[in-house]
Image (tube, rainbow, N blue to C red):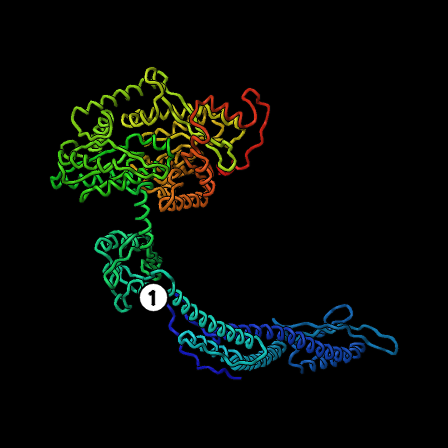
Amino acid sequence: MRVGVAPPRPTKAPEPGRPAFRSYRTKFLLTVVPTIVVLNLLISIIFGYAAYDMVKQEVHQKHWASIRGFASALSDTLWHYRYDQARLIVEGMFGNNEVIIVRVLDETGRSIIESGQAGPDMSRLSTPIHYTDGNRSTRVGVLEVGYSNVTLSQRLLQSVAHAMLHTSLSSLALIFLMLTINRRLIAEPLSRVTAAIRSSQADTLRQRVDWDSNDELGELVETFNEMQARLDEGERRRRQFNERLERLYNRTPAMLHSVDREGTLLHVSDHWLVATGYKRQDVIGRKLATFLTPDSAAVYMNETLPQFLARGVTPETPLRLVKYDGSTLDVVLAETADLRLGGKFPISLSVMSDVSRTKSVEREMVRLALTDPVTGLTNRRGFVEGLEAEVTRLCRQNGRGVALVMDLDRFKRVNDAYGHAAGDQLLIAFARRLAEAGLGGAMAGRLGGDEFAMFIPGLDGPEGVTFARRLLEQLRKPTDVGPAVIESSASIGVACFPADGLSGQDLLLAADLALYRAKETGRNRVERFERRLAEALLVRQTQEQDVRSGLAKGWFELTIQPIVRLATGRMVGGEALLRLHHPTRGLVMPAEFIPVAEETGLIEELGRLVLREAARIIPALVAAARNPDFFVSVNLSGGQVNRDLPNLLSELLETGLPGPSNLVLEIMETALLEDADEVNEILSEISRLGIRFALDDFGTGYSSLNYVDRFPVSMIKVDRSFTRSIGQDGEQNRRTRALMRTTVTLGRELGLPIVAEGIERVEERDRMLELGVDLGQGYLFARPMPARDFLELLAASAGYRTNDPDRSAPPDPDIEVLSA
């Protein structure tokens, strides 16, 4: 049987520190030869012992036969006392060379004949001498013979030598035979198998061994061939996998590439090339930074790539990629690499996702966040941001400009007489006329309610007043609001930059004071800011004093407005609101004293008062509602979100609240803008206490969706402007409904209940129900009322009176949604 492979290759030199290579033949010789030698020695020893016994027994028997014969010959001579003949017989015994001494003793044991001399190595034999006469045997003496052992040893040595010679020759023959069999049947086939293995290591083609014996070697060869077949199959699958991986790499709908430590492109996917318009040969070997805008290239080389080299991974980084045609592409880059092999990049993958559409949507969301949903003008925040930017520009250029703040006269009467839809139509018409009357570079916005603002760069004071009066004439034109044609009017306050203020806030304050003067003096007029109008600040000071006195003398009262489940009308919570009962001015609403409290820092003390009062009344409300998940929400302003707030809430939780989830803190986006990281840390600490947060006036701020994702929000309160505008016809209604559906979907996906504020009509409630809104709040259900009145209302709605605590009411099965 032969093995059909190449002969074995020369043995490689041993590696340093590794034992020298020993072949199977050497190991066989080192194992078998000593074993055979040892066995040969053992056989020889055993044979020697056996030969010794055999030779000894043979000699012994010979000697006994000889001595008995001589004893018989001596018997007659001794009986007849023929000692001379006896001596002759004794001398004849020395004819045997092995005899060295002979003694004949009489019956008394006396030596009568003794011949020879005893030696050092001999053996003695003795036998009695009997004389037989007829049937009578008489002992006549004893024959003692001494034999030399030299002959016995010589014969023994000869026997052992012959035995060792035979065994040695047999062993040599056996060793030769075993070596021949080993070489032919084992060593040579194993060498062939080894050669096949080495050949497979050196070449991609794996060799097979042709061997068909039915022994262990045949099984080994069969196993080896099966292994080679499996390796071939694995190699084939690996190639197929790499081909599929490459196809997947190129067909993945994302821009994939790999870079080295210098940021040089090593590989790019087909989608990368399609998205950018380049050819593969144009990008491979070039640095990625050369395909980025200068700003993005600086970010990548100075920030992203160093972090990539240090950590092997980078967070998502927004960049702008320059395409082949010169246009740019907004992308987000994420990179990862395996740095385990000496800091190299054996595996590196970078993904660039095209976020141009997302960026466009984001810009649209920002625009919507800065846009008033009713009129389409910028809202207060958008206008203030634009005004501050414009004022900064004018400061650098020594320019001038005029700020106008205007207010529709008696707008509330329109809402009361014709409804909010008619009021919104009036606001839309007002905004359209502002846009039509604006000069080049002018900006306009709705500050809230029926209050608008404009800024016109390039005008001085007299020119600004002239423009305002001309605008006032435009605003007086009749407006068709559906139910009626309304002749509206407005009051306008004018402030000039830089004479009346060097910042946007100062200009708005000055124009607002002028507007206040115009409304005081009869409305439907234009007033320019004058320094004497600063006396209005005295009013603010008076209001501040009222707040301080109210805190010191207990003029503030906690009121609660119900929050109901729209589907059932069941009260599930309430919003805690503060009212100031002035001894002379009467009831003062929060819109009047809250801004003053925020400006003076008293808002923090007011907030503590509301929280303590709410915590005091919550146990009674939960008991009255017979609902452990009943909650009371408390508004927080930006000034209240500080490091002391978690400690205050922890103290309140220890003083008797049924549970932390019974208290909900409403926070507006203005409180989240400044130092957002610190605010997030504070809110997270409060959230760990179990207290929930509601994002108030959702949809009116800068980036509401960002706040929902970034901060621990548990509830969303939709601003009342959405509630009012959703019933309108036309494009505005469609957009508002779309935003509301998006908000509801967002709430459901995140497990956040949605509260619609400002529901005042059944139609508004029905529309919110149709859109899937969970909860509602507004005058349709109840106005804010003192806490005791609310407690009685809650007890009555729960099916029992406060003085009948033993009666029970079934729990609302839908409450679980709020506590999730």
Residue 785 shows in the view: yes
At which x and y percent is residue 655?
45, 24
Q: Between residue 342 and residue 558, name the one nearer to us.
A: 558
- Residue 526 vs 709, above or below: the answer is above
Seen from the viewer's position, the closer of residues 493 and 82 is 493
Give percent across and percent down for residue 358: 33, 52
Identify whether 126 is placed above or below 412: below
Measured as percent of width and height from the top left, residue 425 is found at: 33, 39
* For residue 804, above or below residue 737: above
726 w.r.t. 611: above or below:
below
Residue 560 on image: x %, y %: 43, 26
Residue on which the image places disc 1: 270
Q: Which residue is nearer to you in this view: 778 or 715? A: 778
- Residue 623 visible at all: no
Residue 163: quarter of image: bottom right
Residue farthest along the right direction in this orientation:
135
Q: Residues within 10 Å of mark 1 (few under 14, many from 20)?
A: many
- Residue type for callout 1: Asp
Determine the residue positioned at 30% across, 38% down.
479
Closest to the observer, 63 or 627: 627
Q: Quadrant of residue 744?
A: top left
- Judged from this view, the residue extending furthest toward the bottom is 1
Horizontally, is 354 left or right of 570 in the view? left
At numbered mark 1, what does the secondary structure look like: helix, strand or loop? helix
State the count of labels: 1
Q: Residue furthest left?
A: 398
Kindly indicate the quadrant of the structure image that contains residue 91.
bottom right
